[in-house]
Amino acid sequence: MGLSAYLHQLLPRIWLRRGPLAWALCPLAALYGALMGLRRMAYAWGLFKSRRVPALVIVVGNVVAGGAGKTPVTIALAKHLRSRGLQVGVISRGHGRRTHDARAVTHDSHPLDVGDEPLLIHQATGVPVWVARARADAALGLLQAHPGVQVLICDDGLQHLALARDLEICVMDERGTGNGWLLPAGPLREAWPRRVDWVLHTGPTRSAHASDKDQPTQYQATRQLADHAITATGQRMALSELSKRPLHAVAGLARPEAFFQMLRQSGLSLATTTALPDHHDYQDWQARPDRTWLCTEKDAAKLWPHEPGALAVPLVVTPENDFWAALDARLDALLQH
């Protein structure tokens, strides 16, 4: 196991409690916190500028390292806003891509050129998606290509203060804020609590080490696998048809074990599981066509060239009705201005 993969598995366990290793990393966390605080003050004082673009901007992010369900939430938001008749676009940095320019994501884009999550968002929603190292550049490129877009959803970027935003949604899963400490002693990318519009929980609500009065408005969402898998040709196969087969699961996620557990909870029996680092590119994958492979939708475009028989199981996040009501009311007010 390489150092990166080892740390990928070790650090999340350290971050769950305030143990000896977490304490040993506290000096580095203090330095990180000081730098983050100075950066935020620089934006507040106008030393660094936030760029405003001619569209409403909704940032979907989180304050902990690792996935919390941001991309499925972004997909759900894009579908909901389209159902209201709004023109929607999505922007992203495109983490893990090998390119550095600002570009549009197309249905046939290679995931290593645009990032696996932006490609998934575009394929799942059909809305325009652009990626760039600076998210404001992605926003301006998208709006130039699609001038009718009214709402931009920024997938990740809660800490990307260079882009002005109208609404911030912080996604949290069952880990909450872990041990409540900053990186690398804990999972926090920035001090919490901090002002956001809403927190959307994709797992059971956990305390964030602060009093209730300090917390933003909280909403709940359900997170579950779809009842079907998708083939490389786009066909659907019911998960119930797979319950009698020996299955092998692979996931390149921040928390691959969560995906494996959800597969088991869906009644599937997993002969083996392969956990890979988040955004793994699968370039070193050794094909095993004698196995039935299950993967996430995010992994599928990278795995299918090597395992065309692999089946992708979608993850669906469904926010509660009160969240949609609050979102619609806020957007209506913003659009009037």
Image (spheres, helix red, strand yellow):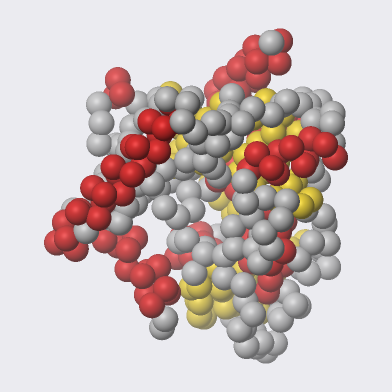
Picture quadrant where residue 10 is located: bottom left
Picture quadrant where residue 237 is located: bottom right
Q: Position of residue 307 (x, y in %)?
A: 71, 80
- Horizontally, residue 191 falls left or right of residue 256, namely left
> Residue 146 versus residue 153: which sits nearer the camera?
146
Quadrant including the C terminus: top right
> Residue 42 versus residue 156: which sits nearer the camera?
42
Question: At x 45% / y 61%, what residue is drawn?
Answer: 255
Picture quadrant where residue 115 is located: bottom right
Question: At x 62% / y 76%, what residue is drawn?
Answer: 282
Question: At x 82% / y 36%, what residue is drawn?
Answer: 144
Q: Residue furthest front?
A: 47
Question: At x 54% / y 68%, what residue is drawn?
Answer: 252
> Considering only vertical position in the picture, is 120 above or below 163?
below
> Considering only vertical position in the picture, is 311 above or below 318?
below
Quadrant including the N terminus: bottom left
Q: Position of residue 114 (x, y in %)?
A: 71, 59
> Considering only vertical position in the picture, is 158 above or below 300?
above
Q: Position of residue 231 (x, y in %)?
A: 76, 68
- Horizontally, residue 183 falls left or right of residue 288, namely left
